[in-house]
Image (tube, helix red, strand yellow):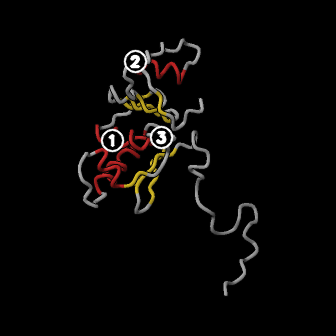
Amino acid sequence: MGGCGTLLMFSDLDAVRRVLFDAREPKPPAESASAPRTADAVVRGRLVIDLNRQRVTWAGTPLPLTRIEREVLAVLATPPPRVWTYRELYERVWNAAYLDDPSAIRSTIKRLRAKLRAAGATVTLESTRGVGFSLADPECDPGSNPGPGPRVGPAAGDGGGTPAPPAR
């Protein structure tokens, strides 16, 4: 579909499912140009956040999230993909002034990570130390999660038989 990080608008969750999981079914009728348009869903790969119904699904499976968890996830999934600062997240989700204490945000992110992991989601909530958080989906963002860092020690296959030269 190639719509990673794209905001799509649907009249209901069934329309989202039809577009994501069965392209052969007819698309919902287009709304008239005079009708006001609101964002009904944020879609990031197989993650669908239905803002009107306050539901989040991963590959069609509902995720049991609290209101705050849904809102944090919706903010992080909002295009374009980027790092959201602690201040931006707090002020947008809690609708209050940020007091330089990221503990509420970190706690929410910790619970969200556990719930996404339990659902088998490939999206991850990545932290940028001292700055904030971002949402990454290796299926949508090639190179966003390159895997573990560089290996330390002998390379695979060299057997480790040759010691490294001493550091000077």
Instruction: Compare marks 3 and 2 and give the one earlier in the sequence.
Output: 2
Image label count: 3
Q: What residue type is labelled 2?
A: Ser
Which residue is rendered at x = 42% and y = 52% of the image? 133
The residue indicated by pointer 3 is 79
The residue indicated by pointer 2 is 34
User: Mark 2: which secondary structure?
Assistant: loop
Label 2 neighbour load within 10 Å: few <14, some 14-19, many 20+: few
Q: Which amino acid does label 3 sit on?
A: Pro
C-alpha separation, residue under disc 3 versus residue under disc 2: 25 Å
User: Mark 1: which secondary structure?
Assistant: helix
The residue indicated by pointer 1 is 69
Image quarter where the N terminus lies is: top right
Could you say which quadrant of the image residue 140 lies in? top right
Looking at the image, residue 131 lies above or below residue 115: below
Looking at the image, residue 95 lies above or below residue 52: below
Residue 34 image position (x, y, % from top left): 40, 18
Q: What residue type is labelled 1?
A: Glu
Q: Which of 122 and 51 is in front in this view?
A: 51
Residue 160 image position (x, y, % from top left): 72, 70
C-alpha separation, residue under disc 1 versus residue under disc 2: 34 Å
Could you say which quadrant of the image residue 12 lies in? top left
Instruction: Compare marks 1 and 3 and give the one earlier in the sequence.
Output: 1
Which residue is rendered at x = 31% and y = 45% of the image? 92
